[in-house]
Amino acid sequence: MTKLNCVNLDMFMEEFTLLEQKITDVNGKNNVLEIMLEDANRLVKFYLSKEKSLTEERDSLLVTVNRLQQTLQEQCNLRVENERLKNDMADLKQRNERAAEDGEAEVQRLVCEMRAEKERHKRELETVRQQYRREVEDAHKEGFNQLEAKDAEVKKLLKNKDVDLEEMKKRLKEQKREQQSELLKLQMEFGAKLARVQSTAQWSQQQQQQQHGSHLLPQSVFKRKLQYFQEEKNKEIVALRQRIRELEDSQRVSGLNDSCVKKRKI
């Protein structure tokens, strides 16, 4: 029994060793599988992200393709429009060339007409110039004759004016002497009247003083007389001054007329 137990124990140990080795191998394989699983998960994530980026790139490429198609369509439309515009330009060029030819022919015709008109105008202008020269010569002759006649008439008038001027000077001198004598006379009269009025006023004042001293007449009577004499004196003074002013103005006007006559003579 003991020997059997020893054999079973050895077998058990071998089996246990084998089992332990298998477990180790299995753990190692599990680790490898876990590593492979992690790698696979990383690869899945990588491929998913790559698929997403590729999808986005595909979408962007689709948008680009659509834009390119639209651009190509626009270019095709522009080519068609360009061809149409080229045809229109060719037509316009032909029309412009025909219009230019017609315009050049019209210009040549107008140039010929202008040359003929210019020659006609030159002839007419020469005719007018000759007629103008003749008229100017005739006008010069007539003007010279009229100028001579007018010069003789002016000389005659100046001679008559000189005679009239001398007479006017004599009359002005006589008037000036008369005005001066009248002015002196008025000044003398003014002085005499002023002295008389002053003496009358002094006499009135003396009479007033005497009467006031003697109390024979009322004071109001002397005041009224004195006021009356003063008013008369003032009226005469104003009239004489007005007369002197009129005479001075008359002399001034006479002097101005004399200077005007001298200027006219010059």
Image (spheres, helix red, strand yellow):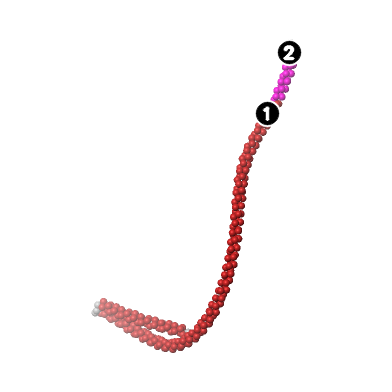
Q: Residues within 10 Å of mark 1 (few under 14, many from 20)?
A: few
Q: Amino acid at mark 1?
A: Glu
At x 62%, y 46%, the residue is: 72
**Vertical side of 83 occupied by 116: above or below:** below
Give me the disc on residue 5. Answer: 2
Total marks placed: 2
> x and y percent of residue 86 in the render?
61, 54
- The boundaries of the magenta stretch are 7-27
Residue type at mark 2 is: Asn
Graded by Cα atoms within 10 Å as few (under 14), some (14 to 19) or many (20 or more), the crowding at tag 2 reads few
| Residue 18 quadrant | top right
Q: Nearer the viewer, residue 25 or 65?
A: 65
Q: Main secondary structure of the magenta part?
A: helix
**Would residue 58 be counted in the magenta stretch?**
no
Whole-percent x, y for residue 24 in the image: 71, 24
Q: Secondary structure at mark 1?
A: helix
Q: Is residue 185 left or right of residue 136?
A: left
Q: CA distance from mark 1 to mark 2?
A: 41 Å
The residue where tag 1 is placed is: 34
